[in-house]
Every structure is written in C-alpha cells, then in structure tokens.
Amino acid sequence: MFIGEYAHAIDEKGRLAVPAKFRADLTKGAVVTKGLDACLFVYTLEEWEKVATKLAALPMSQANSRAFARLMLAGAMDVGLDKQGRIVLPDYLRQYAHLSKKTVVIGLYSRLEIWDETAWQSYKTDSEKESGEIAEKLSELGV
C-alpha cells in the first residue's frame, strides 16, 4: 500500500529516487505512464496488469475510450530500480508532466503519482479549499 507525500529531485539524467518506503514493492519492476491532472502514475507490475486489462476491454467504438487507452497505454514505460533505488523517467514523460528538478512523489494506495513540486502545491491548495464540496459529492458514492 502506497501512502504519504515525499519531496525528491530529478537529476540531470532524468533519474528520480523512489522513496525508500516504496522500493520493496517495486523491486520486480514498475510501469510509469501519463497520468491525469498533469502528473505521472507509477504502478507495480501486478497492479499495471489489472489496469491494462481494464483499458484493453474498453469499447473501441467510443472515442473517449480510445483516447484514454491511448493516453495510458501508449504513454507507458517499463522501469526498474537501480542500485540506489532510482528510476529513469523518459524525457517524453517528464515533458508531459512538466517536471523540473523538484518533484513530489505521493502514494495513493495502489499507485504512486509524480508531480512537479509547484504544480502539486497549487493542486493541493485548490483541493483543500474545496474539500467540503468534494466530500459532499463523494458521500453520494458511499465514501
């Protein structure tokens, strides 16, 4: 289970140190892909298999299904931890998420998200301001 928020830096070679707390779950490899809200999603191989299976089952006849599957599947890249617990983020993914040197890695139960630090702070501030409304809407879903 991934939880928490951790500030990290990307080096000049595009390597990001994965928080030590999460490394054991990623030793067999991981998949990083384009996420939503201008961040990257990181999945364990096991979790990625579940996500990819659902994406592959979306109806090809619907434009939104095709677009979302393309975003997630075509944007995906297998990554592995090096000896220092880092992953290499491909240039096209760093560009997609507007990642600079300073990043934030957040744990969201079954996935990690990688955010540009400034973008994360802005998103978090906005979400916290609207937390009451968000909670009210989610209560309809039983959350």
Image (cartoon, rainbow, N blue to C red):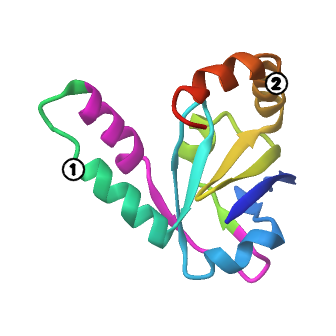
Residue indicated by mark 2: 128
Along the line of sight, the residue nearer the viewer: 2 or 29: 2
**Which of the 4 quarters of the picture holds residue 32?**
bottom right
Instruction: Say what secondary structure mark 1 lies in.
Output: loop
Residue indicated by mark 1: 57
Question: What amino acid is labelled 2 in the image?
Answer: Glu
Question: What amino acid is labelled 1 in the image?
Answer: Ala
Image quarter in which the C terminus is found: top right
Q: Is residue 26 left or right of residue 21?
A: left
Instruction: Say what secondary structure mark 2 lies in.
Output: helix
For the question of whether residue 105 can be seen, the reply is yes
Q: Which residues are magenta?
A: 64-86
Q: Is residue 93 left or right of residue 58?
A: right
Residue 102 placement (x, y as % from top left):
85, 43
Tell me: residue 58, above or below residue 51.
above
Residue at the far left in the pictured view: 61
Residue 81 placement (x, y as % from top left):
66, 75
**Which of the 4 quarters of the picture holds residue 71?**
top left
Image quarter in which the N terminus is found: bottom right
Q: Earlier in the sequence, mark 1 or mark 2?
A: 1
Residue 129 placement (x, y as % from top left):
82, 17
**Which of the 4 quarters of the picture holds residue 18?**
bottom right
